[in-house]
Image: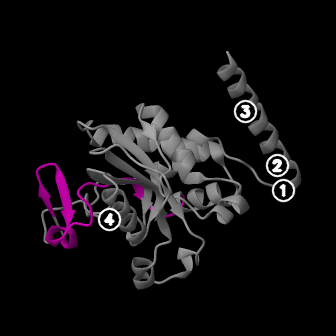
Amino acid sequence: MLRLLMRTWLQRFRGDVAYLERMFLGRTRPEAEGAVREALALCGSERWCEGCGGSLEEDTSGPSAVGHGATRLCGRCRLQPMFHGFIRLGRYAPPLDRLVQRVKGNAWHDVAEAFGRALACAISRKLSRPPGGWIVVPIPSPPLRRLRRGIDHTGSMARAVGRELGIRCTSCLRARSSVRQASLGRSERLQRSGLVWRGRSRIPEASSVLLLDDVRTTGGTLLKARELLERHGAREVIPAVICVRD
């Protein structure tokens, strides 16, 4: 009963916030499920490299990609895959890129949760449950940036994935304040990552981790996160992101 009352109060509160945004700030919040569904219909991709998440051409029989059973790899990952498994919803292109930006810029919690539910569906189609079970870990933003935006968008996504799949969500990574990655070049992105391990955090040994983020650009942050997770006991790490910048 208490949970139902809290959920009802939260829905009313979000409705009041949306009304105030429309009246005083001129913001129009879209219907979450419809906005995500429309963006993915235009930018979703059925074929991507399961080593790095990059888009593949429709014909994957040529030199640019190769299929190994159920696994498809691009030419670069055929030599050395970035990850052994990758899940994404689509390409970083309009209108999906703008929707992701507005989730962060306008603190659209309901749209972030809708993205999380869409990711949960994609995860359930691609992955089976490993012996040690899955754990969801979001890539965090620096605390001051979350405070300024008014949203922890990857945290909202991760909690939605956890609820949909019935698995644990843990925030064991912490982001230090640093230069925004959007202002960095490719080589700087690969070399710099503000991620550190959160003190006293731990994950059960031999657990498999679903590593959630909104956009994969070079993959440097995801690689740093995988290094930290494996150092602290993760058996395998599979990234799951909304979109990939090709």
Judge the density around disc 4: few (<14), some (14-19), many (≥20) Cα neighbours within 10 Å.
many
Q: CA distance from mark 3 to mark 4?
A: 38 Å
Residue located 72% across and 33% down the image: 10
Q: CA distance from mark 3 to mark 1?
A: 21 Å
Name the residue tied to disc 2: 22
The residue labelled by disc 4 is 54
Magenta segment range? Answer: 66-95
Q: CA distance from mark 4 to mark 2?
A: 37 Å
Distance in Å between CA atoms under marks 1 and 4 = 37 Å
Mark 2–mark 3 distance (CA, rounded to whole Å): 18 Å
What amino acid is found at the position of numbered circle 1 in the picture?
Answer: Leu
Query: Is residue 71 one of those drawn in magenta?
Result: yes
Q: Nearer the viewer, residue 139 or 219?
A: 139
Q: Residues within 10 Å of mark 1 (few under 14, many from 20)?
A: few
Which mark is first along the chain, 3 or 2? 3
What amino acid does circle 3 point to?
A: Leu
Looking at the image, tell me whether mark 3 or mark 4 is earlier in sequence order.
3
**Image point 65% across, 22% down: which residue?**
3
Q: Give the residue pinned by disc 1.
A: 25
Quick check: 140 above or below 38? below
Residue 12 included in the magenta stretch of the image = no
Disc 2 and disc 1 in contact, CB within 8 angstroms: yes
Q: Position of residue 25 (x, y in %)?
A: 84, 56
Amino acid type at circle 4 is Gly
Q: Secondary structure at mark 4?
A: loop
Q: Are marks 3 and 1 in contact (CB under 8 Å)?
A: no
Q: Quadrant of the N terminus?
A: top right
Q: Disc 3 or disc 4, which is closer to the eye?
A: 3
Of badges 2 and 3, the one in the foreground is 3
